[in-house]
Amino acid sequence: MTSKSVTSDRSDTFNSEGPLRSLSDFPAVPFSGREEKLEELHSLFFEPFYNAAEHIDFDGLKGVRLSARAWRSESSTATLLLVSGRNESHAKYAEVAYDFFTRGYDVFCFDHRGQGFSQRELPRSQVGWVESFQAYVNDLSTFYEQKVEPVRKGPLFVLAHSMGAAVTSLWLSQTRLSPAAVVFSAPMVELVLKPYPRLVVELMVNRALKSGREKDYVLGGKNFELSTYGFDLTNCRARRDWNRGIFRKYPQTQLGSPSFRWLHEALLMEKRLEHLEFPKFVKCPLLVWQAGQDQVVKNNFVQFAGQSQTSFIVAYEAKAQHELLQETDSIRQRVMCQTLAFFESWKHTAGAD
């Protein structure tokens, strides 16, 4: 397997030459022109690639069993740690993992506790609950220390989306580890709260916790609904429909609305990061992607981090919704190419941890 150009994919091809027998057989696929062929691409490339992953499940905090996958090659020259967002599984990241793997990266990804293929902690398995966001952080740390670091090849890069970016931020504040570079996609620093203002939401959450309802859905919360999924996440119909298909194929991965406890923890994130002077503690190059049409998190990273006196890059996609890595080809191609270029620029200058 050879590494492809990160700024252009003209030399890539959609065609496979004969049956794909191992991970090294998978070719890099161009970023453009995928939407109209997405089902075919999944059938030929992304699904077989996903199914060929190593199963590296592990026990997180308090023995919760967490589902994890890895794609490794002898010819890879770097390692990528993918940290997913809320209500996501590693199955959803098949296309993303494929793109990085076929361009020279070993890829590692796991499902957070209480979602995806990982163990649920409540009898009502669709309620989005976590005792503390620190549990997510501890799980990420365990995953890296037990499954990634012992077999890590070359410099470490991190790509984290939404809630995963928030968890990664806390993790980086607690570890001496310094990745070669980090990219955040729509980081969950501050949630978009509707229809109530933040003060009202905080009062409702605090009242619910005091009355012992921390494991109940937030006001208006409900179980997962396939028919309404994704319209506030991406403008790409093909990827939205494909992700619905994952939930249909693996109904055990479906997750409903957040609980009062999860929302309480999410509301604390902004204050926690402010207290840590984030992103001051990120001792590595940082690229932050923000979406102009984001309906999930506020795209105010520049204002939030403006007082940190830390160098970072903010890239803005005005027509993108929350899931920039699942967007239309025109948006996704820019995000992927620039993310790869950002990583590549630090690939040969990174020292050992």
Image (tube, rainbow, N blue to C red):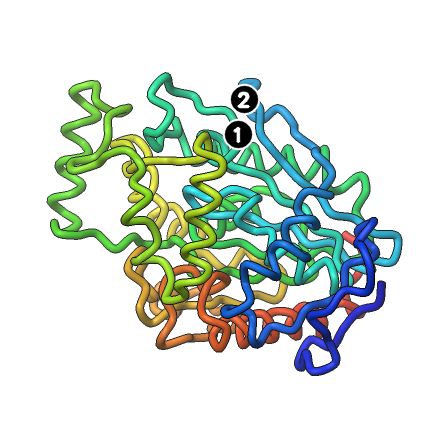
Q: Where on the picture, by quarter, is residue 247? A: top left
Say which mark, if any, is on residue 277: none
Q: Where on the picture, by quarter, is residue 120? A: top left
Split into 4 quadrants, where in the image is the N terminus? bottom right
Is 12 above or below relative to 219?
below
| Crowd tier of the residue under label 2, counting other residues whose Cα lies within 10 Å: few below 14, some 14–19, many 20 or above | some
Say which mark, if any, is on residue 64: 2
Foreground residue, 32 or 68? Answer: 32
Q: Which residue is pictured at 18% across the width and 32% down the height?
A: 206
Q: Which residue is pictured at 65% across the width and 70% down the height?
A: 340
Q: List x then y, in percent, for residue 263.
A: 29, 38
- Amino acid type of the residue that numbered disc 2 sits on in the rendered structure: Val
Mark 2 vs 1: CB contact within 8 A: yes
Q: List x then y, in percent, for residue 85.
A: 46, 47
Is 171 above or below relative to 62?
below
Q: Secondary structure at mark 2?
A: loop
Foreground residue, 336 or 140? Answer: 336
Question: Label 1 belongs to which residue?
Answer: 118
- Amino acid type of the residue that numbered disc 1 sits on in the rendered structure: Ser
